Amino acid sequence: MPIHPDVAARFHYLDGLPSLRAAYGDPVLIQQIRQFETWDSTAGPPAVHTRSAAAPGPHGPVPVRIYTPAAGVPAGAPGLVWLHGGGFIGGDLDMPEGDWTAREVCAGAGAVVVSVDYRLAVGGVCYPVPHDDTVAAVAWVRDRAGELGVDPARITIGGASAGGNLTAGAALKLRDRDGWGPAALALVYPVLHARVPSSSSPSLAAVLAELPPLFRVPEGESNPLSENYLGGPLSSADGYAFAAGAILDGLCPTLVLNAEYDHLRASGEAFAAAAALAGVDVRQVTIRGMLHGFLNLPAEVGPVRHCLDLISETVAQGGV
């Protein structure tokens, strides 16, 4: 499928940028990125109830935002612990990928959604701090499921991009530490390798060639965002920092949702294949016409709605 026309029509906002990496580090150039990412929605996100709380963690309290359906929490409701992305250095609870996604799943699945404000890898913070925050938040939801109105057997955890990394690592840590796993893991355009593998798929290579040069990542290039998250060389990564390096046997049922036009699709595809070989119940779906970060777009964009529906179905069913 071609790049979605509503996305392609906005590429002009990026004219003149030397690279996305340079733009994100420049307070002037970043405004072009914001223009590209900011869409007017004809209808806002669903109206649900929200409240703030905090989970105790080894590095201090971890702020969370709890979303509950407007009509009230049904008995034995499903739950979702959700983490936004942002390359480990950005993003927050209010970005569309965080807030709108939580609202859509809360309404669509009749679920209690807990969105996690994990510490970012800035100001000297690095792994394992964001990972520890995530583990603490998931364990807090698990241990207080009854108070939250959640069926403890119907807790899904998931996230987008860096958030997908963190929830995959948390699922593995809780498997190994506590012998516990969520009902399902929902990973959206996740980064699961410290160094994104080269794609062996001709179809992926072909669609990436259609992207503006700004979005192309040369094969074999080092990943400074991963190095920043690790606080050291990529060789220092363990399986909790990047789940592709872990033993995947016994991982919970997993949904992987990749963007068609995204070099990180190679990471999601390779992880899904390895998980399947390890006997994990895994489902992989490519969201057609979309670029990385598409959950920041309005839900009326068809492929975005499709992705949100798949997450909601997984949460409601407690499996893939």
Image (cartoon, grey):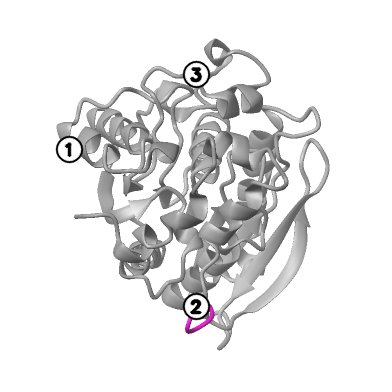
Q: Name the residue under label 2.
A: 41
- Label 3 sits on residue: 222
Q: Residues within 10 Å of mark 3 (few under 14, many from 20)?
A: some
Identify the magenta region. 41-45
Q: Is mark 2 on a helix, strand or loop?
A: loop
Q: Which amino acid does label 3 sit on?
A: Ser
Residue at 41% from the left image edge and 63% from the top image edge:
315
Query: Overall secondary structure of the magenta stretch?
Result: loop
Check disc 2 and give the amino acid type. Ser
Q: What's the CA distance linking mark 3 and mark 2? A: 36 Å
Where disc 1 sits, the SS reads helix
* Mark 3 or mark 1: whose residue is earlier in sequence: 1
Q: Mark 1 points at which residue?
A: 203
Q: Which residue is more in the foreground, 86 or 250?
A: 86
First-in-chain label (1 vs 2): 2
Q: Are marks 3 and 1 in contact (CB under 8 Å)?
A: no
Asked if residue 300 lies in the magenta stretch, the reply is no
For residue 67, the mark is none
In the displayed orientation, state which residue is furthest to the front: 16
Residue drawn at (43%, 21%) of the image: 245
Question: What amino acid is at disc 1?
Answer: Ser
Residue 28 appears in the rendering: yes
